[in-house]
Amino acid sequence: MATATAAHAHEPDYLNAKTGIGSWIYTVDHKRLGIMYLASILMFFAIGGFFALLVRIELMTPGETIMSPTMYNKAFTLHGAIMVFLFIIPSIPGALGNFFLPIMLGAKDVAFPRLNLLSFYIYVLGAILAVASIAINAVDTGWTFYTPYSTRTDTAVVWVTLSVFILGFSSILTGVNFIATVHKLRAPGLHWKRLPLFVWGMYATSVIQVLATPVIAITLFILIMENVLTLGIFNPQLGGDPVLFQHFFWFYSHPAVYIMILPGMAIVNEVLATFSRRKIFGYMFVAMSSVGLALVGFLVWGHHMFVAGMSEYATLVFSALTFLVAIPSGVKVFNWIATLYKGSISFESPMLYALAFLVLFSIGGLTGLFLGTLSVDIHLHDTYFVVAHFHYVMVGGTVFGFLAGLHYWWPKMFGRMYDENLARVAFALVFIGFNMTFFTQFVLGSQGMPRRYYDYLPHFAPLHGFSSVGALVLGAGFLVMAFMFIRSLASGAKAPPNPWGSAGYEWATASPPIEHNFHGQPVMTRGPYDYHLATDEELFDGFPEEAAAKE
Amino acid sequence: MENQTEPSLQLPAQLSTFAPEVDWLYHFIFWVSVVFFVGIVGSTLYFMVKYRRRPGVKSEPTGHHNTLELFWTFSPLIILFMMFFWGWQGFLQMAEAPDDAMIVRVRARQWAWTFEHPNGAIEDNEVHVPVDRPVRLVMSSADVLHSFYVPDFRVKRDLVPGMFTSLWFQAVQRDPGSVPDDAEVDPNRVLYTSQVYCAEYCGAGGAWGPNMGHATMYALVHVQRDQDYQAFLRAPRPLPCPQENGTCAVSETECSPEAAGSCLFGSKGCTACHQNQAGGPQLAGPTFVGLWGTQQQLTSGESVEVNEDFVRQSIMDPRSQVAQGYSPVMPQIQLTEPETNALIAYVRSLGTATE
Ligand SMILES: [Cu+2]
């Protein structure tokens, strides 16, 4: 790739180009918005994690441990709702996508920078409503808001659903913006077959966001109307159908699973390529499998409802389609492994998270087979097996992918390195703690422990106790990680432009990037993974100035 | 297939005719997964070691391998289809109850179960069923979603307010021959008991205890020999009485109506909405402590004395007289005449206790 990079080394970076609080609040710079998203989602990740710990501590011993059953119901609801709507869905697109998508396209910004700012403030508004609902009377419905419970409880259901309704608009606007950006702002030479896989993943995600989110918006809007005006749409006492709500809800929330996982996969592509110095094996198959997942993801919502009262034929079709999901997921995993083959692999912390993703996502995917199989699902549905399965996909998949990306791009975003040893300690704790917590839950579930239980029968006690200890280890891992990142911001070593020696386009900019990302318009002359075509200068992982001085 | 009547590490005991097949498929998927997982992790680890970065060794550019891609895209379809197909077959069996199945009505409400046998006999939070005979449950819910789940039988089905759902099972012997076929008929003999859970989240009450929330919405299935079960159906059902260990049970010794009422108050689920402890938190319905003999304001504007007639009317037809300040959520609960009398006696005893 040819740019006029090194020439003006002294232009200020995006963090220093403008100053003052107003320069942040009204910014339309995609990088600053990315950072603002990052700060917000990390805050909600911490809050959601806090509720998760409350839940696990309560379950550490049988009977009441630290809180009442009503508190417990609120705690697990808040954990789920915050993690899904305020953390995972906006996490990778909002923070890392905003920051890196334009740079990877060689663009100055997203297609509609002002819309991007609006989308962020809509997110903030939604978040404020969600927090307000906690203060008013925290919901206890579970993050799924199933009717008729959600129309009967006296907790602040209307506030939370309004919040999710509003958050949906943020998601839609980000999706529209990314789609337009990918179509319109690719640098010269960046044709579709050279598109970084992170961009492909963001693109597929955006398509789902735009198509599926309106459905949850309508659903929640009806739910709000039903609560406020006592319409009889879902409420059986007024002639409504509670199962209809489940159809509506999962019509969005199943595709939403792909809104959550595709970005994680997208990051893993980048990290695996960089740390094994090799183009992703079967590039086109991997790119198309994202699109395939996005499409099939729309057709399988019914697999959440196998025991809920659907016709046998609907059940048949949903089960069959569900197995199709395994195909694109499998294709990705096989291609990732093949990428390692004959690579030149190094094991810095981003790579550790990417490799862990491979293992954990495989477990998540394979256990999905149990749940897609009708007769077996009858036994496992709504037990801890399901809880374990989706945590392997959402945490082992998306969150590990997000952490891989955060560690990978941190030097680029903030221009500072972090303590690699500490990062590895945090990784080890997170990896071990996660598996202790959730692998145990597969066994609990297959033994018949139902989910969302405040208490349990004595024979489940040892496994529950072990799982809770795992959660504490996991929590400790995140504390170490937080300390490590904060220390990096305060006193980390200065990062070179391309610390990992990657051929990816985003590493051709300065660390942190200048306000307009590149000097002049970059022209792509090779793909982002063409290590055999990249020059030594492009792959140089130190400081170009120092190298020049030495000569 | 043989039934494995002891729980294994992964799965509960197999106590219905479905269980062996479901478990066979479970283990099939399990071993397929193990093979794939070992393959994935094994090759990853091998490549990690073999191709770790070494000075002077460069990575090789990635080529094109369309045949390989097509192979691993389409070959897993065969295994997936087998899982799908067997799962679907098993599911069909579970969906269609045999015509000769015995029908038990199940009614759920927050947070209790009521079972009604073909002859009209009622049980709360426990149900007796005959072994080796198909039993079909026809289920409904009075309030929110619930789900009837018996892990030992591998059955589960949601209860949806406003509609009937159903499931069926056939319990099998646990240790065949332990009770000889010609053993004397005994309505109280139980071969074994399996646990019933509510598997669909349904909230929790202000206080905590048995049947006070989703997590204690338990019930028990008692499996009996057919002849014992038939005798059980015919046997007179004395009211439960408090036992020395604090629980309630049907026993030889009779007790006062108030005492029996205190047991029914729990097993019929009144505790979910009515406080019976002085100073306890206010629940969805009026507190009974000190209620007897007072004047109750009704939504109709009337004011009535809380006496025998009023309480009986309130229990038997809750919607007819709704107390001021409460929502009309009290379900109609099936009670026999002696049960109703015992409950009234208990409510009276609570009312006069503080006077
Ligand atoms: Cu329930």
Image (cartoon, coloured by chain):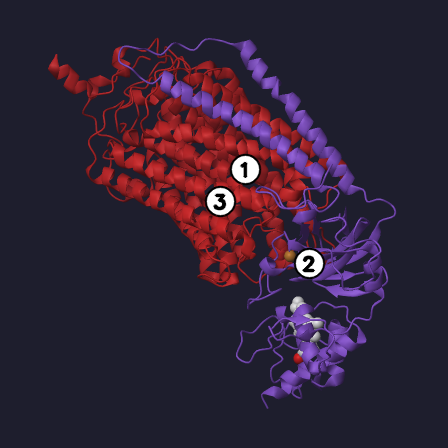
Chain colours: A red, B purple
Quick one: B17 or B277, which is closer to the camera? B17
The residue carrying mark 3 is A85
* Residue at the extreme bottom: B355
Quick one: A63 or B337, which is closer to the camera? A63
Disc 1 versus disc 2: nearer the observer? 2
- Left/right placement of residue A358 relative to residue B149 reads left
Q: Which mark is residue A451?
A: none
- Disc 1 versus disc 2: distance between alpha carbons? 38 Å
Amino acid, disc 2:
Leu
The quadrant of the picture occupied by the N terminus of chain B is top right
Quick one: A443 or A383, which is closer to the camera? A443
- Left/right placement of residue A403 relative to residue A262 reads left
Amino acid, disc 3:
Phe
Disc 1 element: helix
What is the chain identity of the residue bearing mark 1? A
CB within 8 Å, label 1 to label 2: no
The residue carrying mark 2 is B220
